Amino acid sequence: MKVPPTLSTVLSNLFKKPATNPFPNTEPVPTPEGFRGKLVYDVDKCVGCRLCVMVCPAGVIEYVPEVRKVTFWLGRCVFCQQCADVCPVNAIKMSDEFLLATYDKYDDNLRWFKEDEIAELKRKLEEQKKAKEAAKKEGSK
Ligand code: SF4
Ligand code: SF4
């Protein structure tokens, strides 16, 4: 009797190893080069030009005028990389991090440049301003 082609494929596959990746018992499948994962913001490099705010199609980025920096809430990010491409000083990069599930949409892991960091930078800028003014006064004496 002739074995039907489908049956012979099924039978031969029965003796092969499963072609699955049993994550989370193993490492996830490696990401390729140029993968667009969670973005990373380097606040020190940022010059506050606002180009990223203008190109973001999802309203993820907000400008903070007092400190001339931007904040990100990645809960809305669509990982298009336009912000990273437009940034003139490479302050934004896409990392290969993609395990971002959370119970809280305002999770700290989904935000860059948080309120306490903004307050700290504001305080530093105030101090610098005062120091400059004091130095000016000293100079004019
Ligand atoms: S990757 Fe795209 S959606 Fe995400 S913050 Fe950048 S521009 Fe906005
Ligand atoms: S484009 Fe770059 S330098 Fe300009 S505001 Fe955005 S992160 Fe800062």
Image (cartoon, rainbow, N blue to C red):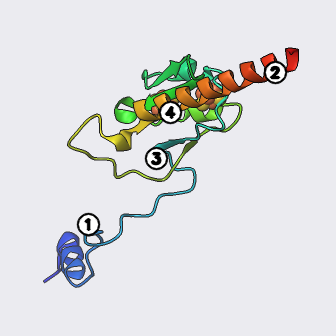
Callout 4–callout 1 Cβ contact below 8 Å: no
Q: Is residue 117 above or below residue 38?
A: above
Q: Secondary structure at mark 2?
A: helix
Which corner quadrant of the image does residue 27 belong to?
A: bottom left
Alpha carbon distance from label 3 to label 2: 51 Å
Question: Which numbered disc covers residue 37?
Answer: 3
Q: Position of residue 34 (x, y in %)?
A: 57, 50
Is the residue marked by circle 1 packed among few (<14), some (14-19), or many (20+) residues within 10 Å?
Answer: few
Q: Position of residue 36 (x, y in %)?
A: 50, 45
Which residue position holds label 1?
Answer: 24
Decide which of tag 4 and tag 3 comes sooner along the chain. 3
**Callout 3: helix, strand or loop?**
loop
Is residue 49 positioned above or below 74 on the image?
Answer: above
Mark 2 is on which residue type? Glu
Q: Nearer the viewer, residue 120 or 19?
A: 120
**Which label number is shown at residue 137?**
none
Say which residue appears at 43% left-offset and 52% top-offset.
97
Q: Is mark 1 within 8 Å of ligand 1?
A: no
Q: Which residue is at a point 20% across and 43% down the rendered structure image?
A: 103
Query: Would residue 49 appear left or right of 12 to someone viewing this image?
Result: right
- Give residue 139's position: percent from left, percent from top: 86, 20
Mark 1 or 2 closer to N-term?
1
Q: Are marks 2 and 4 in contact (CB under 8 Å)?
A: no
Task: Give the label, 1 or 2, closer to the camera.
Answer: 2
Residue at label 4?
Answer: 120
Quick check: is the Cβ at mark 3 less than 8 Å away from ligand 1? no
Q: Earlier in the sequence, mark 3 or mark 1?
A: 1
Q: Nearer the viewer, mark 3 or mark 2?
A: 2
Q: Position of residue 17 (x, y in %)?
A: 27, 81
Q: Is 125 in front, or is 42?
A: 125
What amino acid does circle 3 point to?
Answer: Gly
